[in-house]
């Protein structure tokens, strides 16, 4: 196989608003991989696509046709993201070796529930890889999560493997902090092995802050740009103390959080209990909740076990200087960096991650981290759909079923 | 790669009532493949699973959870079919090299329709291959149809490739007739090339006969066992003539038929127009419609273009001696055989087919027949999920990511 390879990673997140596409140059495979971002772009979903996705992901009744059509439609939209990426990066499609596509999660249940008389978990990502492989001509790996769940894991998080290959260091202990809606950490002690990674959700990331901004502005603002509003408030200590007493924070890892713990219900309870508090003070307090719950988790569950030197922040929260300042104060013993400082733009990490995971799949390397997902063993993730690039021969003809199908030149 | 290989083919059909599992010994790949059925078994779906599948496939609103859970549940049930197959055939799981799983079709639309402002086709098969790969340890190929549709095909029929590798003959022209709900033919002229295959649906198979039996018996009988009832009736010539005048039969191939043309509406019209006719006579007449529409299609669209010697019947209709007798009379110039006579039990052909198609996939051979599906070109079908068998080394250890994951012995 060619080395280095050009691999595209595609990620569409739970906001259901578009897809990020990363062009990644990858050398090698396995834990000695070298990955470098060449270009990042994204395309937004049209409002009607966003609406259909919302319907499917919301749990409301929909027709099978809607899911089936969305699966094919997203495959087409993802292909367009690849075209745009190549155009912007001035790379020809036929220089790309591989695509890794996370797909759009429309259902994920990692706690077993009864269904037709059996206890079941399941996950469903859509965005048909066959369409990507056909439209781009490039072999495509998709559907990374089901294989980990089949092996008894929660299908998440899958990024710890990526964190390891991108950030592990022989001399420095590093904690990777991703602040999305939920905040999660991956701890990499110096010269650690992949099996010793610890990764878990610390609790709220931007979810509670963003929710509060939307409530107070009636949806006019979606988030507190740069943490500017929070920085003008003061911390309401008794409120903060009460919120930090939530049993989630005391619970030792592994643990995962979501909208069930820190979504609209959590927000409603805060607002109900503090009707006289100002917007600024409440926002400042939940920003502190975010910073303190992250710092507490690191201090309780990571630092006692391994020496750590750096805290490397990615995700939307990395663009909130106020939050970063509070984290720096709460964890003064760690050097705080953004993943950008180490060559991995914080907004690109997940899309880059699925390029890296796809590369592992075609090399038949397991890439889930059982310590992080709870799987009983490591497995090769994903499903491979062959593009025409795997069939292309040097003379420009195609490898087809033994001499019977007409040869087709490019 | 090992040769011959033991490959399992899994097929669950549109009746939504269970899964057929075929153990197939395959030598080689491509058009020189040799395939021999070692064992066939099936497991029925429990009534609650059947009910949930009916809901999903019927087009009624359902939750995304139902599809997602059914996808994982079918993966588990398919695994159990593989276990049962191995047990009955006295073969160990680790002797199996590959699984090809068609999955359960819950949606299929091959005519473009408007969705979110785009003209779309799509198809959706469920039965999570990751569960199969994990539970059995065997590399699994699934989702054969989307890749053909991505290339502009109808995603069906995929069996012509299988018909070709199993039945093509240097000296004899053969027509493969499969009589399921719908009847379809594949024509293989002597020493023909794969690209010259003609394959299309001739019209009703058992669908109209079975429907009539259910209507007249109030659902007490599902079909006319051995054609016994039809054989006691007489053909109502004017009714037959009128039915054969349906434009579908005159339409030249490629063409596909389904419940839209020959389902309940078609049946209701027959019953309405012939309220005084006896059950026996009407059944005899629609049996004749079935035989004559098949014979007519062969005479109009196949025999003028190529010399044919044999008509080889498979599918449920092959177990209806009355229908076979009518076909023999209508096509006296052809030798009528059952596929069983050539070593392929008529009930096993489809499950065997997906074992053969999976074998082609892992050899990177395209296996759709563009002349049959309408695809713009041949493609490698399916998605590959790696089982642990691909990682197992000779010493019983496993190939894992470069020396960092603990070795695990079997």
Image: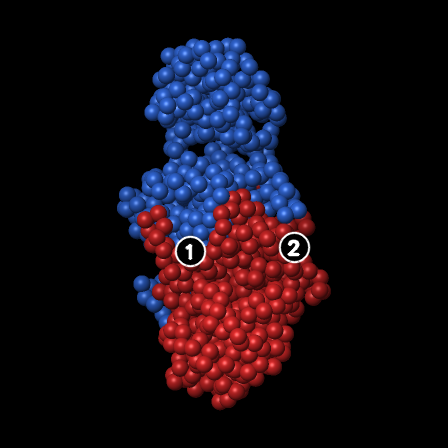
Chain colours: A red, B blue
The image quadrant where one finds the N terminus of chain A is: bottom right
Of badges 1 and 2, nearer the viewer stands 2
Q: Earlier in the sequence, mark 1 or mark 2?
A: 2
Is residue B233 visible in the rendered image? The answer is yes
Q: Nearer the viewer, residue A87 or A1?
A: A87
Residue lying at 52% horizontally and 82% vertically, measured from the top left: A235
Q: Nearer the viewer, residue A327 or B142?
A: A327
Label 2: which secondary element: loop
Chain letter of the residue carrying label 1: A
Labelled disc at residue B161: none
Compared to residue A319, the image places residue A50 above or below, namely: above
Instruction: List the residue tagged with mark 1.
Output: A122
- Is circle 1 on the same chain as circle 2? yes
Compared to residue A140, the image places residue B85 above or below, namely: above
> Relative to B379, is B394 on the left or the right?
left
| Count of labels in the image | 2
> Relative to B128, is A127 on the left or the right?
right
Label 1: which secondary element: strand
Residue lying at 38% horizontally and 83% vertically, measured from the top left: A305
Chain letter of the residue carrying label 2: A
Disc 1 to disc 2: CB gap under 8 Å: no
Q: Nearer the viewer, residue B256 or A336?
A: A336
Instruction: List the single residue furthest toward the front.
Output: A276
> Relative to B45, is B250 on the left or the right?
right
- The crowd level at tag 2 (other Cα within 10 Å; few <14, some 14-19, many 20+) is few
* Quadrant position of residue A197: bottom left
Residue lying at 69% horizontally and 66% vertically, measured from the top left: A89
Compared to residue B292, the image places residue B313 above or below, namely: below
Instruction: List the residue tagged with mark 2.
Output: A46
Could you say where residue B242 lies in the image, as x and y percent from the top left?
55, 14
């Amino acid at each position: 196989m060619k080395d280095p390879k050009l691999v595209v990673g595609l990620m569409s997140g739970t906001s259901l608003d578009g897809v990020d596409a990363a062009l990644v140059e990858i050398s090698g495979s396995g834990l000695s991989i070298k990955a470098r971002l060449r270009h990042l772009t994204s395309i937004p979903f049209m409002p009607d696509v966003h609406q259909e996705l919302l319907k499917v992901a919301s749990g409301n009744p929909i027709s099978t046709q809607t899911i089936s059509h969305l699966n094919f439609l997203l495959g087409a939209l993802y292909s367009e993201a690849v075209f745009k990426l190549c155009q912007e990066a001035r790379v020809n499609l036929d220089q790309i070796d591989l695509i890794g596509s996370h797909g759009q999660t429309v259902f994920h249940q990692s706690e077993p529930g009864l269904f037709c008389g059996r206890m079941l978990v399941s996950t469903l990502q859509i965005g048909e890889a066959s369409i990507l492989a056909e439209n781009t001509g490039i072999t495509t790996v998709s559907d990374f999560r089901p294989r980990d769940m089949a092996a008894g894991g929660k299908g998440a998080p899958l990024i710890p493997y990526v964190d390891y290959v991108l950030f592990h260091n022989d001399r420095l202990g590093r904690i990777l902090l991703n602040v999305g809606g939920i905040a999660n950490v991956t701890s990499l002690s110096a010269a650690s092995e992949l099996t010793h990674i610890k990764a878990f959700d610390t609790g709220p990331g931007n979810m509670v802050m963003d929710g509060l901004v939307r409530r107070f502005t009636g949806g006019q603002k979606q988030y507190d740009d740069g943490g500017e509003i929070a920085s003008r408030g003061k911390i309401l200590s008794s409120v903060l103390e009460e919120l930090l007493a939530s049993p989630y924070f005391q619970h030792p890892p592994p643990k995962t959080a979501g909208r069930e713990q820190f979504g609209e219900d959590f927000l409603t309870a805060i607002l109900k209990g503090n009707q006289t508090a100002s917007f600024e003070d409440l926002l400042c307090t939940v920003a502190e909740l975010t910073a303190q719950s992250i710092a507490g988790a690191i201090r309780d569950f990571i630092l006692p076990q391994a020496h750590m030197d750096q805290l490397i922040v990615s995700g939307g929260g990395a663009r909130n200087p106020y939050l970063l300042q509070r984290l720096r104060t709460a964890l003064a013993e760690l050097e705080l960096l953004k993943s950008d400082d180490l060559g991995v733009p914080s907004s690109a990490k997940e899309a880059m991650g699925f390029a890296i995971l796809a590369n592992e799949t075609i090399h038949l390397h397991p890439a889930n981290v059982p310590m992080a997902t709870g799987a009983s063993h490591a497995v090769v993730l994903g499903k491979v759909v062959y593009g025409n690039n795997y069939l292309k021969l040097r003379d420009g003809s195609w490898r087809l079923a033994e001499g019977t199908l007409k040869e087709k030149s490019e």
